[in-house]
Amino acid sequence: MTFEDRYASAVRSSNLRGKSDVQGAVDVLGAAGLAAKRTPLGMALERLFVGDNAAAGEIVNILAGMLVGKAWHGDRIELPRTEAADMARAVLAWHRDGVCKPCGGHGVLVMRGTPTLGDQRCTACRGTGRLLFDRFFSMERLHLARWLVAEMEREMNVAGPAAMAALRPKLDIA
Ligand SMILES: [Zn+2]
C-alpha cells in the first residue's frame, strides 16, 4: 500500500475500527509529521490531495514565497507578494484540476450526437487533454510559473517516500 493510501484513510479516520487501527492511523500521521519537516511543501500537497482543503492556504503561502525568492535571485526583479500569491493560486489550481473541459481530458472530441470519441483533435488543449498552462501567465512570468510547477512535482515525489521511510519501522513487516 502506498503512503498516500494509508494517509488518506488515516485522515478520514471515521473507518477506524479497533485499537490497532487507531494506532496505525497515529503512526501514519506521525510519519507525515516527520516528513513535513523535510519537505513542508510536499507534505502540504499530500494533505491537500487526500482531502485536507485547509492545506491550500499554507501551500499558496509557501509557493508565493518561493516565487518571490526565485524572481529576485534569478531575474533581479521584485515580484510583489500579491502577484506571487495570484500566480501560486493559478499554478495550484492547474495542478489540481487542469483537465481540459471541451474534451474532458481525452484530447479528441466526441462525435456529434454520440458518446463515442472521434478522431478530431481538441483545439482548446491542442490534443494534450490538459488546460494549456501557458495561457494562465504573461510572457514575462511564464518561466517562473513553469519553474514552480517543476518544484511542486519534485517536492511531491520526495514527500511520499520520505513519509514511507518514517513509517516503515512502525510496520510489522517480517
Ligand atoms: Zn481538450
Image (tube, grey):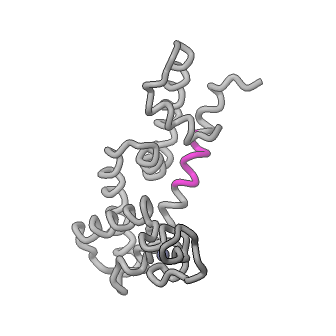
Is residue 128 visible in this depiction of the protein? no
Question: Which residue is the extreme one toward the front?
Answer: 113
Q: Nearer the viewer, residue 135 or 83?
A: 135
Q: Nearer the viewer, residue 34 or 104?
A: 104
- The picture places residue 48, in percent across and down from the top left corner, at 41, 47
Horizontally, residue 14 falls left or right of residue 24, namely left
Question: Which residue is the extreme one toward the right?
Answer: 174
Q: Nearer the viewer, residue 16 or 7?
A: 16
User: In the rendered structure, does residue 140 fall within the stretch colored magenta?
Assistant: no
- The picture places residue 2, in percent across and down from the top left corner, at 62, 41
Q: Quadrant of residue 68?
A: bottom left
Report the residue at 50% width, 46% height from top: 38
Query: On screen, 15 above or below 3?
Result: above
Is residue 75 visible in this depiction of the protein? yes
Horizontally, residue 102 falls left or right of residue 65, namely right
Query: On screen, 6 above or below 107?
Result: above
- The picture places residue 144, in percent across and down from the top left corner, at 40, 75
User: What number of labels is visible?
Assistant: 0
Q: Quadrant of the C terminus?
A: top right
Q: Quadrant of the N terminus?
A: top right
Query: On screen, 96 above or below 58?
Result: below
Report the residue at 38% width, 42% height from top: 52
Report the residue at 22% width, 67% height from top: 82
Horizontally, residue 114 falls left or right of residue 102, namely right
- State the extent of the magenta-drawn residues as a range: 156-163
Q: Quadrant of residue 166?
A: top right
Q: Main secondary structure of the magenta part?
A: helix
Q: Nearer the viewer, residue 152 or 10?
A: 10
Question: Which residue is the extreme one toward the top?
Answer: 19
Report the residue at 44% width, 66% height from top: 98
